[in-house]
Image (spheres, grey):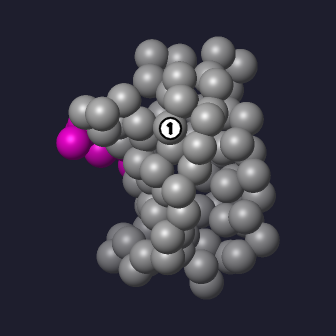
Amino acid sequence: MTALRLRIAGRVQGVGFRDWLQGEAQRHGLSGWVRNRADGSVEALLAGETPAVQAVVSACRLGPPMARVTAIEESFAEPPGEPGFQRLPTL
């Protein structure tokens, strides 16, 4: 099991990034969450089998069609306490 916290920068708000990421995470069987940040970035916690987490991180480098990702910061994190993947309010 791997858990990563991502901070995704670029044109990632207003382009459907959270919905897209939630779909990718669910498709790969991951737990965690995604939310917008007040600074214009998107933050996510991805937890699951290492290959699945890495596949979603790689997909985040491109994002949905209207997004333009300029940077992704990754850090190890504690897995979420409950299963499933959800959208959290903006922080």
Which residue is more in the foreground, 18 or 58?
58
Q: Viewer-proximal residue, 80 or 11?
A: 11
Which residue is painted at 60% across and 73% down in the image?
A: 48
- 38 over 27 or under it: above or below: above
Quadrant of the rendered image containing residue 39: top left
Magenta region, residue range: 84-91
Above or below, 75 against 42 in this view is below
Total count of labels? 1
* Residue displayed at 59% across by 43% down: 71
Q: Overall secondary structure of the magenta stretch?
A: loop
Q: Position of residue 87 (x, y in %)?
A: 37, 42
User: Is residue 57 among what the camera can see?
Assistant: yes
Please determine whether, in this image, residue 11 is positioned above or below residue 1.
above
Q: Which residue is mark 1?
A: 9
Which residue in the rendered view is the most extreme toward the front?
Answer: 70
Query: Is 85 covered by the magenta stretch?
Result: yes
Q: Is 19 on the left-hand or right-hand side of 82? A: right
Kindly indicate the quadrant of the structure image that contains residue 50: bottom right
Please tell me whether residue 34 belongs to the stretch shown in magenta: no
